[in-house]
Amino acid sequence: MPSAPTSGTPSLSAPTPGAPTSGTPSLSAPTPGAPTSGTPSFSAPTSSAPLPGASSHGAPWAGAPSAGALSAGLPSPGALSAGVPFPTAPSPSGQPAWLAEMYEELRRQGWTPGETGGASLRRRVRTEPWAVARQAAVAALGGDGWAQLGAAAGRRSWPLVMDLVAGRLRLRLSEDLAADFPGAAGRPLRTAVLDAIYGQHDGTWLATFEAADRLAPGIAAPLSGLAAVARHAGWWWATERFAVLTERPASLTRDNVGRLHRGEGPAMEFPDGYGLWAWRGMPIPPELVAELPTLTVARIQKEENAELRRVMLEHFGYERYLREAGAHNLGSDETGTLWRLDLSGDEPLVMVEVVNSTPEPDGTSRVYWLRVPPQTSTAREGVAWTFGLTAAEYRPSIQT
């Protein structure tokens, strides 16, 4: 199946007359090569290459989980009963313009305000098949065998994907929906995030069942539909009347330990322009990213949020900041020099300046800066702390 991005936020297509309205929703693929833009657009995708087992009436595709959550949440029973307002103009007061376009597209596809998509099928589509497959795996491989296979096949991947990527995305979506739809009326839309099925991110545990199926064929059979979607789509939603699928990220940037990390743009970006900005795993506002190349000491000192200030310090450089902000020299010994700078609303910045004992090829010696606890009183104590030792215990016989 092509994974080309589709255009913005999709529409919900009305079910084919006589088609079933329960069970596993049918799925169809996006139009290859469809244009994308930062502001979602709303042409209904069509395709002659549906997912395996998909029927002709298909499911709408969204350019990002943000649009998918809204598409699935707007027709939910909770949103309708809560009276989520339907805009009647392209730019209604208090609502983004693209949201009005999305409502209009929902209507164009045959859905009318007041209709409900029915209850979420997440449990039937994901949770219950997983339980059945797990029971079969334990029966075939034994408890110890299943545990060993899980450790070998997917246990290391789970935190790298679900904790460091999917979890951060879920938090960002919840925060964005809370900001765009505050109060009780928006709660059903925020709840839609919890109904998401994770698509490709579910591959971390689906791979374990696939490995088990090779040892005992048939174990992964209950998960075949879920695995088919995971191979081709990002997060998706299933209800009694329709399914909404979303594209996978167009780009993903992480640091050396797997955390979302990028200093010049979104660390995770989707085809419709939605993105998540992060620095060493911590979500940051996009406007901060734009400021990073032109940071000054005054701007860093002005920042009231301690976490964002630390992001600024890492990007600006501790050495440069200590030098330009007027840090105090607390003393030197054979291990290095201890510096301290008080920060408003945060713990003091205390660092040890150390010189690499091994010269570079050009004969110079590289200088390193080690951040140490605020209570550190000597350079030796700070260097020892980096090795998990006290100052008295730190007695290196050879330095490299």
Image (cartoon, rainbow, N blue to C red):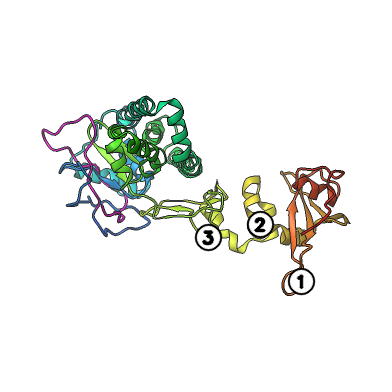
* Kind of residue sitting beneath label 3: Glu
Element class at badge 1: loop
* Distance from Cα at disc 1 to Cα at disc 3: 31 Å
Q: Whole-percent x and y of residue 50?
A: 20, 47
The alpha-carbon separation of the residues under discs 3 and 2 comes to 18 Å
Q: Secondary structure at mark 2?
A: helix
Overall secondary structure of the magenta stretch? loop
The numbered dot on residue 264 is: 3
Q: In the rendered view, would you say 92 is above or below 287? A: above
| Circle 1 residue | 364
Report the span colored magenta: 1-30
Disc 2 designates what residue?
299
Let me know if residue 206 is in the magenta part: no
Callout 1–callout 3 Cβ contact below 8 Å: no
Which quadrant holds residue 213?
A: top left
Can residue 305 be seen at all in this image of the molecule?
Answer: no
Single out the residue that lies furthest toward the left. Answer: 18
